[in-house]
Amino acid sequence: MGKIAPSILACDFSELAAEVDRVAAEADLLHVDVMDGHFVPNLSIGAPVVKCLRPRTDLYLDCHLMIDNPGDLLDDFAAAGADSCTVHVELGDPRPLFDRMRAHGMRVGLVLNPETPFDAVVSYLDEIDILLFMSVHPGFGGQAFLPEVLDKVRAAREIVDERKLPVELEIDGGINLETAPLAAAAGADILVAGSAIFGKPDPAQAARAIREAAWGAG
Ligand code: DX5
Ligand code: ZN
């Protein structure tokens, strides 16, 4: 059975703690989308919001950093209580960032954009806990799933299984009842979903339905 990571990007931010409570029973992680208006053409939230969430939930806080200078903010995210930070491989060699995340006791995530080839992350597989595949162009919720990304997920699944690496494969963007089974079949362990969960009247029920579509009723 895999994991569901509701993305709070799709929340009503004026009621953030209540939104988290609404989904908590069916969430394995909370996905926190951090955008700087430079790496992606949108602004969202940062470490101060993680700091406010931390005492309000026991859920794992999965921070996806869509920012030009993650190195400038890792200390803040660690201090705020992030369980992991996930950094984009498109920014260049992520190893110095990995070292700093480990030093803070955070788990280490690496993410690649839809157009970035799988080869760009292969050499880091031994050093990370989470490999995140963007299945939309990052920056906005509510976009359509890009199915060509599944080839990369399958390639990663094969290597991770063959080498028995403790890496979780996560996929982010356009996950809903139709695309969740495709992502799960390709080998994704963690499904991020924003609008397909918080866009529904009962977010917990929506998360459960996505989980069941992906992996069955368990
Ligand atoms: C996009 C973000 C996603 C976004 C997903 O840049 O990284 O996490 O919240 O939203 P949906 O599920 O609506 O595609
Ligand atoms: Zn994300």
Image (tube, rainbow, N blue to C red):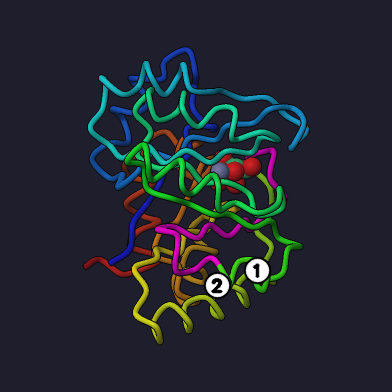
Residue 149: give its label. Answer: 1
Residue type at the position of mark 1: Val
**Going 48% across and 35% down the picture, which residue do you hit?**
32
Residue 153: give its label. Answer: 2
Residue type at the position of mark 2: Val
Classify mark 1: helix, strand or loop. Answer: helix
State yes or no: residue 158 in magenta.
Answer: no
Viewed as shown, does residue 169 lie left or right of 42? left
Viewed as shown, does residue 29 lie left or right of 145? left
Along the line of sight, the residue nearer the viewer: 31 or 108:
108
Along the line of sight, the residue nearer the viewer: 100 or 77:
100
| Whether label 2 touches label 1, CB < 8 Å | yes
Query: Height in image: 92 above or below 131?
Result: above
**Going 38% across and 45% down the picture, which residue do you hit?**
102
Q: Pinpoint residue 31: horizontal percent, then vertical percent.
A: 45, 40
**Going 65% across and 54% down the picture, which residue do you hit?**
93
| Quadrant of res 111 | bottom right
Q: Pinpoint residue 74: horizontal percent, then vertical percent.
A: 50, 32
Which residues are drawn in magenta? 124-141
Along the line of sight, the residue nearer the viewer: 62 or 97:
97
| Quadrant of res 121 | bottom right
Q: Pinpoint residue 8: horizontal percent, then vertical percent.
A: 47, 32
> Which quadrant of the render holds ligand 2?
top right
Asked whether mark 2 lies closer than 8 Å to ligand 2, one says no
**Going 59% across and 28% down the picture, which residue do you hit?**
72
Q: Pinpoint residue 41: horizontal percent, then vertical percent.
A: 78, 33
Dot 2 alpha-carbon crowd within 10 angstroms: few under 14, some 14 to 19, many 20 or more: many
